[in-house]
Image (cartoon, rainbow, N blue to C red):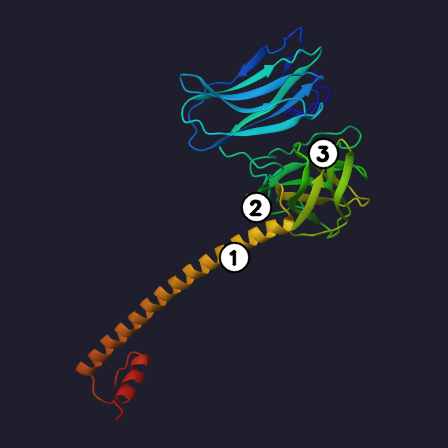
Amino acid sequence: MPSSFYNSYEQSQGHYMVVDTSSTALPRRASAVLTSDTYGALPAPGCVSFWSQFGGDQSGTLNVYVVEGKKKEMRKLLSASRTHGDNWAYRSATIHPGGTWELRFEAVGAGGDRGHVALDDIHISHHPCHEPAACDFESGFCAWSNVRFPLVDTYDWDSTNGAGQFLKKTAINEDHTLGTKEGHYAFVDTGSLHTEGSSAWLTSEQLPATSGSCFSFWYRTDAGDHYHAGELVLFMSSAQGLRPVWVLHGQHSNAWQEQQLQLDSTVDFQFVFEASKGSRPHSATVALDDLKYVTGRSCDAKQEQEGEHGRGGKTNAGTILAVLLGVLLGLLCGAIGYLIYRKRKKNQAGAPSGFGPGDGVEGFDNVAFEDVSQRT
């Protein structure tokens, strides 16, 4: 059975589904199936996500299908096997069934002496799947998790919005994604880290080796006394150990700031954010938002692409604004001209050619117009 626990409670009291795939319980090529309820059609693409774990040298294969319609037509969403050791791994697939459908999880035996396949936190959402390691925290932690490491990580990151933090001195009122109190972000209150050096780890799903990719994120540190003595570190975790790639120490930003990192790894890895408590007793909030991982592209190329999109958007907006202002100015000039014309016709019909002190002139513009027009 799983020796490390990932589940809704991230501890041994939590529950998960597991099947024994040893040859005595599930012979080679035999299968054990877990089927969901039947659901109605999705109006737009949705996402199926779950965590899985494989144990034993020959633990078998996990196949995931969507079964559609009355004819029970099966379409494979993904297939997985033991590639991440005994670690829990996050997996997801986009679905868009047009009619009734159900999910089918199939564990296939490999004939090993000992083995198992475990499942936990199966979610079906009505939005497309997130890109790997990406998250805006508007609908939870995406594929990021608070997996605890004994004697190292004893606290959790949490997610909230500004509306839920209004009573805290170190509260962050607005997220980065929406820029409003309703927007969500991930955070750690260092006041809850009771001892110096205690930390909270936020871990991504397993990511494949890369020869050059860009990881970007927005961070913020707020403290009631305008001094932050904690630390935020980004690690790359792999079979080769923990490698720190970015460190923020003792900085009070009081505003969202972006960081972009050009990264590479010869082996599969995970991102790990570690927030830790400093030596001072003051409480501070360490926050993250809008994590994005772009594979096979440099951060410079990512900036150029975003800049082009931004410039194009501004150009279009400027053109539209100029047209609208031109139309409004034309209408305004036309209206003024029409009023002047009407007033002039009225004055020409009933007013004397010159104005004396007792003449009732209603408007300054009309006075100036009449005075000038009567000069020869």
Residues tagged 2 and 3 counted as in contact (Cβ below 8 A):
no
Residue type at numbered disc 2: Thr
The answer for how far apart the CA atoms under marks 2 and 3 are is 32 Å
Which residue is situated farthest in the bottom direction here? 376
Residue type at numbered disc 3: Val
- Give the structural element (helix, strand or loop) at label 2: loop
x, y percent for residue 353: 22, 89
| Residue 320 visible in the shown view | yes
The residue identified by callout 1 is 311
x, y percent for residue 234: 72, 41
- Which circle, 2 or 1, is nearer the viewer? 1
Residue at image point 29% right, 83% down: 369
The residue identified by callout 2 is 177
| Residue 17 visible in the shown view | no
Residue type at numbered disc 1: Arg
x, y percent for residue 7: 65, 24
Residue 364 or 110: which is nearer the viewer?
A: 110
- Give the structural element (helix, strand or loop) at label 3: loop
